[in-house]
Amino acid sequence: MLAPPFEIMLVAALTGAACALPGVFLFLRRMALVGDAISHAILFGIVGAFLIVRDLRSPWLIIGAAGTGVLTAVAVDVLRQTGRVKEDAALGLMFTALFSLGVVGIARGVGNIHLDLDAVLLGELAFAPFDRMIWGEWDLGPRGAWVMGGLLLLNLVLILALYKEFTLSTFDPDLAAIFGFRPAALHYLLMGMTALTVVAAFDVAGVVLVVALLVVPPATAALLTDRLPSMLGLSVLLGLAMALGGYGLAYALDLSIAGSMATVGGVLFALAFLGAPAHGLIAQARQAARQRERLAQQMLIIHLLSHEGTEAEREENCVETLPQHLRWAPAFAEQVIQRAERAGWVMREGDLLRVTETGRRVAEEVLGAHGGTISSP
Amino acid sequence: MGDAMSHAALPGIVLAFLLTGSRDLPLLLAGASLSAWLGALLVVFIIRHSRIRPDAALGLVLSVFFGFGMVLLTVAQRRPTAAQAGLERFLFGQAAMMLRRDVEGIALAAALILLLIVLLWKEFKVLAFDPAFAAAIGLPVMALDVLLTTLIVLTIALGLQAMGVVLMSAVLVAPAAAARQWTNRLEPMVILAGGFGALSGILGTLLSSWIGRLPTGPVIALCASGIALFSLGFAPHRGLVWAWKPLRYVKTRKVISPFERNPQLKDGTPGPLP
């Protein structure tokens, strides 16, 4: 038996990983908000099933809740297909209604039994070590770890077994339908996976953290990679990082565990948003700057060439007057000239700038690519 | 968007309390508005500057802001003062805890918002239906967009006390979706939506006070959803119940040939060959 903090970490890590897998496909199918709706709607299923069986640990709770989740997804699809409301409104209508019913159910029927609203929103990860899996005389560890581990395995097996079906129906549903992959069946299988995962994670993490675990890792991974396999792997890793980092933060500063996990997720996303190698804000800005500079250098040599040997050459191709003719700021012009010199495209002859052989070839290539020739204006 | 904004308001409320230590409503509402605004801005920024699509951007901002708000709430709960006790009511809302002063403030602010909408009615209408046209005829689209978002944020902040951050979107979405079923014009739709909203508010409050142990916010949300569901089913023209009938009618109708329908056609056609 592990010490309680490690058991909590284990449960948290398994939850993070299990949620990240269906989350990737929800993200790619632009259905992140369906995950949100399902996670709210299952409250009704849990409360409803509880009011019938009156046992908080009954498997009917999970079945009822997962069923409600899938039904929500179906109802949203049906509502949208009637064309009477848009998808976001259909989602908003469904999940608020079912969530309200759940809350009313808790307030009316459940009374003082442990199923209170704070637990609904935030989960009770801290209590995970108290709910144990007992088999005979053996203490097999916290129940949450078994449930989440089982779900992680289930999600993993389903995704690996139906990998090409899921991939194709995500990126090209029409082609998938032609191949006989039944995109609709896969769609509802994914909904079922999501609902089941959310229900299981609900106990551990609460409504809102489940949404964070479903959405944040895939969104962050999407900024870091362009390939599905690495996106899946990265999402699982990010889910782990969120879970463990969040728990660490909460443990160190005595904060809400679920809230800390979402916060850590937000920080991870912000880091990727700024610093991702290809899609980050910084990388994009640098690329834009590089492109601007390249364009300026090309403009410079073409300008020089088009006035070469003309009467205005002395006037046009002079270092001092260049900023004025090309309408550049003097500092920027100086920088462009220096870079072009270093690249071996131009050289100075006193005040005058001359294009080198290399520069001439580059200019021809650039103009050739655009179907033009150098001519005097 | 309304859902993301109302969730995003939570850290603002708690932060406003943590920084000032007071529980003055205007102060908390200012915090709520600011952080809801920031959330909306972030959603737009993320969509514009990355490959993240709107649904994920909304889910991301919603859950992270809410999570952060929860973290701040645990910090606030460690304060020795009893003042923090009321902060939790912003999660699910507690209309019964509102004071007369609060209600007066909300009424005043609501009247102001209504006045602005009436004054800028044409502008908002053009903006909603055809932003490109609005820009072409020289309206300050950006400023109007900002103003409209501010009005939504303020409305959310005002509603939080009664509805809570989780269910706020119910009263934003459901009355509008219901009103849409009854009319194809914006003017009646807005008036109807307002009416439906008020109706669900009154009905919800009455129900929750008649029947014991019913939280007000969820009951109001249920009333709003109920009205929306009824409208989806039974509104004239667009109601789904009516949509079934013509379908059967078409199916069972006899196929009429063009000649039968229009005998004149026959006259112009050449007769059978001899």
Image: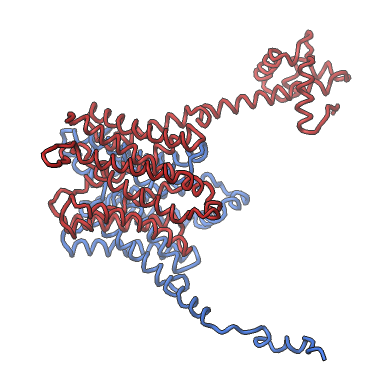
Chain colours: A red, B blue
Q: Residue drawn 44% across and 67% down?
A: B181
Residue B13 vs A310, above or below: the answer is below
Q: Spot the residue most to the bottom.
A: B274
Q: Nearer the viewer, residue A224 or A153?
A: A153
Asked whether B73 or A96 is in front, the reply is A96
Q: Residue furthest left?
A: A137
Q: Is residue B231 left or right of residue B207?
A: right
Q: Quadrant of the C terminus of chain A?
A: top right
**In front of the other: A38 or B89:** A38
Report x, y in % for residue B112. 39, 53
| Place of residue A117 in the rendered image (x, y in percent of width and height, measured from the top left) | 21, 48
Q: Is residue A342 above or below residue A83?
A: above
Q: Is residue A112 visible?
A: yes
Where's residue B43, x and y in %?
A: 45, 41
- Tell me: A288 left or right of B100: right
Q: Residue at x 49, y 41 (%)?
A: B47
Circle count: 0
Q: Give the quadrant of residue B23.
A: top left
Which residue: 31% across, 36% down? B68
A111 to the left or right of A231: left
Q: Name the quadrant of the N terminus of chain A.
A: top left
Q: Position of residue A93 (x, y in %)?
A: 37, 58
Q: Which quadrant holds residue B190?
A: bottom left
Tell me if residue A131 can be seen: no
